[in-house]
Amino acid sequence: MRAVPIDAVLLVSFGGPEKPDDVVPFLENVTRGRGIPRERLAEVGQHYFLFGGRSPINDQCRALKAAMEEDLRDRGPDLPVYWGNRNWDPYLSDTLARMRSAGVRRAACLFTSAYASYSGCRQYRENLADALTDIGEGAPELVRLPHYFNRPGFVAPFVDGTADALRSLPAGSRIVFVTHSVPEAMNAASGPEGGRYVAEHRDVATTVATEVAGRTGREVGWDLVYCSRSGPPSQPWLEPDVNDHLAALADRGVPGVAVVPIGFVSDHMEVLYDLDTEARATAGRLGVAFTRVATPGVDPRFVRMVGDLVREQVAADKDDERGGGTELTGSLGPTWGNCPAGCCRNPRGDRPAACDAG
Ligand SMILES: CC1=C(CCC(=O)O)c2cc3nc(cc4[nH]c(cc5[nH]c(cc1n2)c(C)c5CCC(=O)O)c(CCC(=O)O)c4C)C(CCC(=O)O)=C3C
Ligand SMILES: [Fe+2]
C-alpha cells in the first residue's frame, strides 16, 4: 500500500478560445517559439472566427468532467475531478494551486489525447512540470493514467458510428480514418521505441474495420489519412492529407466515405473545421458522399472506461489484483501511465516532464 492514496482526478486538456478576443492570444500561447508561418496562423485564426471565436473544446471538457464526477460518484471512488488546460483558462498552474488549497496530495491525470507523440503526450507532461514549478511548495503529486487508445470504451463508439454510416452510404464506399498530422520526425520519436503514433492509429483503425466487417458481414476498404498539417512546407509531415485523399478516391470512382476521426477524443476545432467544413466541402465538389462519424465525447462507454482507469490505478496502488484483467483491443498490448525515460522525445531537446517513470 502506498503512503499517499489518490485523492483527486485531474482532467488535462489543450484549451481553446471562448470569444473572438481570445483567439489571437490563444494562438500565441500555442505557437510561442514553435516556428509556425504567419500565414498558417492567420488561416487557423479564421477557422476560429468562422465559429464565432469559440472553440468547442472547453465545453467538451466541462461535459466530460461532469460525466466523470457522476461515474465516480456512482461506481466509486467518489473523488473530486479538477480540470486544467495547457494553453487557455483554466490554466494548469491555477488548477494545481486550487488543488493544493483543497489539500489534494496525489492526483490521477487523464489527458484528452489518446495516443503517444511529443504533441499528444510529452508536451502535456512538460506543461504539467512547468505548472508544478510555478506553484512551488506543497504541489500535489501527479500520476498519469495509462494511454487508452486500445480500450473498448474508446473504440466502441467509433465502431457503432462507422457501421451506422456505412448502412446509409452507397455500396463500394470506403472508411477514411483521420487523425492530426505531425512531423514525420515526431512520429519516428513517438513512444519508447519510436513510430508509436502511426502504429497506435493503425491498431485502432484495424480494430474498427474488423469489428465493422464482422457486424455488417462485408469487408470495407480503409485508409489512415491526416488533417491539420502545420509547420513550414520544407518539413515533411505525415500524409496524405484528407482532402488529397478524397480526390484520389474520387478518381478511382469511390462513391462515398465514412470519415472516422479516431485521432480526436471529442469534437475539437479540427473536427468542426478541417473535417465537417473543409473536407465535407471537398467531397461535395468531388461528388463523393460524406458522413463524419461521432467522436467518443461523453459516450457512456468512454466515460465508464475513464472511471475504470482511475479504479485500476487505485487498486494498483493498494497492490489489489482485482484491478487486473483489463480487456484491450488490437495487437499492441498493455500501455503505460507514467512514461519511461526517453519516451516521445522533445525534438527541441530534453526538458523536465511530470508523470515520469524515470
Ligand atoms: C498530435 C496533435 C494533437 C492531438 C493530440 C491532442 O489532442 O493533444 C493536437 C491537438 C490539438 N491542436 C489544437 C490546436 C492547435 N494545434 C496547433 C499546432 C500543432 N498541433 C500539433 C499536433 C497536435 N495537435 C502540431 C505538431 C502543431 C504544430 C506546432 C507545434 O509543434 O506545437 C495550433 C497552431 C496553429 C497550427 O499550426 O495549426 C493550434 C491552434 C487543439 C485545440 C483545438 C480546439 O480548439 O478545439 C487540439 C486539441
Ligand atoms: Fe494541434
Image (spheres, rainbow, N blue to C red):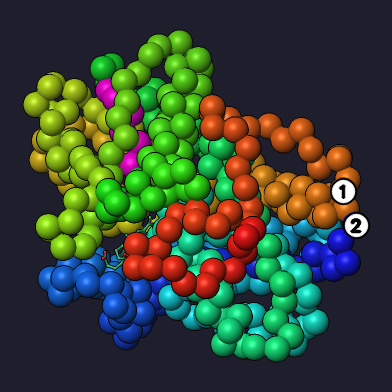
Residue drawn at x 31%, y 79% is 32
The kind of residue tagged 1 is Asp
Residue 95 sits in which quadrant?
A: bottom right
| Residue at mark 2 | 1
Which percent across, then down, holds residue 352? 52, 72
Which percent across, then down, holds residue 173? 27, 23
In magenta, the rendered stretch is 173-178
Residue 319, numbered label: 1
Work out which quarter of the rendered image holds the C terminus and state it.
Answer: bottom right
Q: Is residue 198 above or below residue 53?
A: above
On the rendered structure, is 239 left or right of 329?
left
Residue drawn at x 72%, y 76% is 140
Q: Is residue 37 found inside the magenta-colored segment of the image? A: no
- What SS does tag 1 mark? loop
Q: Are marks 2 and 1 in contact (CB under 8 Å)?
A: yes
Q: Is residue 32 above or below residue 261?
A: below
